[in-house]
Image (cartoon, helix red, strand yellow):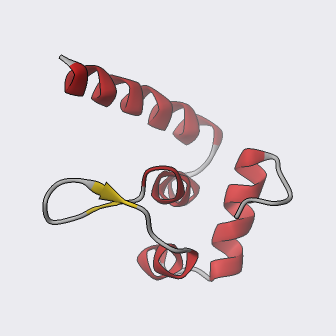
Amino acid sequence: HNRKQNLINWIGNELKIMLKYGELESVIIQFKEMGKLNKEGKYEKITWEEIAKEVHWSKSFCRNVYRNYKKKRDID
């Protein structure tokens, strides 16, 4: 039951993000907030460099997307 509720919450959050931002921005935000799934099916945090490599954009672009989403200057 807990896993199901977590998935429902995650989907709801993701939909809110996607409505406000484009798909690429949504992916960047998701990577920063949740990390990336590993082979065991668990999320692990990834660096800005890894996020940039995944979405094929610069590290600074990714950081700016997340900074705008958080409405904060310091995001690290």
Disc count in the image? 0
Q: Residue 11, percent across and down?
A: 38, 31
Residue nearest the observer in this picture, 39 or 25: 39
**45 lies left or right of 21:** left
Q: Quadrant of the N terminus?
A: top left
**29 lies left or right of 7:** right
Residue shown at 57%/80% (left/top)?
Answer: 57
As displayed, is residue 37 above or below residue 47? Answer: above
Residue reaching furthest to the left = 40
Residue shown at 69%/74% (left/top)?
Answer: 61
Residue reaching furthest to the top = 1
Q: Quadrant of the C terminus?
A: bottom right
Q: Residue 38, percent across and down?
A: 23, 64
As displayed, is residue 46 above or below residue 33? Answer: below
As displayed, is residue 17 above or below residue 74? Answer: above
Residue shown at 57%/75% (left/top)?
Answer: 48
- Quadrant in the picture for residue 5: top left
**44 lies left or right of 56:** left
- Quadrant in the picture for residue 6: top left
Q: Residue 75, percent across and down?
A: 73, 59
As displayed, is residue 43 above or below residue 49? Answer: above
Residue nearest the observer in this picture, 60 or 39: 39
Residue shown at 49%/31% (left/top)?
Answer: 13
Q: Residue 58, percent across and down?
A: 62, 83
